[in-house]
Amino acid sequence: MLNVRDLSVRYGDVLALEKLSFSVDAGQIIGLVGSNGAGKSTTLAAISGLVKGRTGHVDLAGQDLTSLAAHDIVAQGIVHVPEGRRLFPFMTVQENLELGAYGRAARVRREEQLDYVFTLLPKLAERRQQLAVTLSGGEQQMVAIGRGLMSCPKLLMLDEPTLGLAPMLVEEIFRLVRAIRDNGVPVLIVEQQVVHVLECADYAYVLESGHCVMQGNGRDLLQDDGLRRAYLGL
């Protein structure tokens, strides 16, 4: 489905990502893990067309996205839920969700997708007329993910969706990620919760200084002594 080949990104003289290649197939959760500054968020931003100075190739289901603008990449089916939620605080839950359906194809399916999001996230249905600013951190993250789903993605990319959340809410987010995958939308997830993402991921890539240094089945990587020492302190 998604194929990334030799993706590189420079910020001025700094090489943030160098010749990264990976793929995401239908029905998969793919994890990108690594320490701060490893290039995880830069990878998502480069795929989304949000950063300049990138080289390499990105295609979705055979469609070359490399030279497209960010809004055109969304129209092709790649939806990026950024770190930090970025909701409109003084708009309601439903208004924030409906903004996700701004694209032409998504507008046609807005009511259908809204019903789907409320079925998947019943807490949001209960709070649909509540201002986003009044929600808990976990509820705000649910709105951010729900807004992404409103765009009818073929691939959903999540950047640090559990940042700042309590452990119980972290578990809830990963249950949601699995449900999204099981409902037919593959997920590419960037996370520092290494154990959780590797337990959840069908396949994962470990990034270090802009390079992929390890890859494999998520649960297999959890058993790797080098990874356990580097990222889990074990």
Image (cartoon, rainbow, N blue to C red):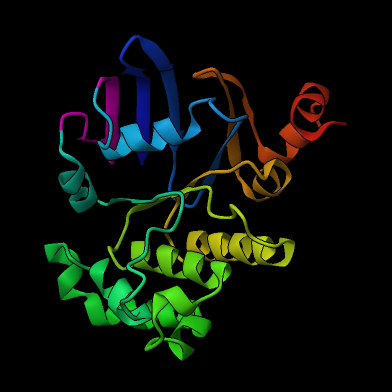
**Residue 112 position (above or below residue 38):** below
Which residue does the image show at 47% across and 79% down from the upper left?
134
Report the quarter where the C terminus lies: top right
Q: Residue at position x 62%, y 55% from top?
A: 164
Q: Nearer the viewer, residue 35 or 103?
A: 35
Magenta includes 59? yes
Range shown magenta? 53-67
Relative depth, front residue between 129 and 80: 129
Quarter of the N terminus within the rendering: top left
Q: Where residue 174 sits: x, y (%)?
A: 62, 59
Residue at 76% x, 24% y is 230
Q: Main secondary structure of the magenta part?
A: strand
Q: Nearer the viewer, residue 129 or 72?
A: 129
Is 221 located above or below residue 140 in the figure?
Answer: above
Q: Name the one closer to the observer, 64 or 110.
A: 110
Q: Residue at x 43, y 63 (%)?
A: 145
* Residue 139, position as x, y percentages in the image: 52, 72
Return the residue found at the far top.
Answer: 13
Q: Position of residue 84 (x, y in %)?
A: 46, 53
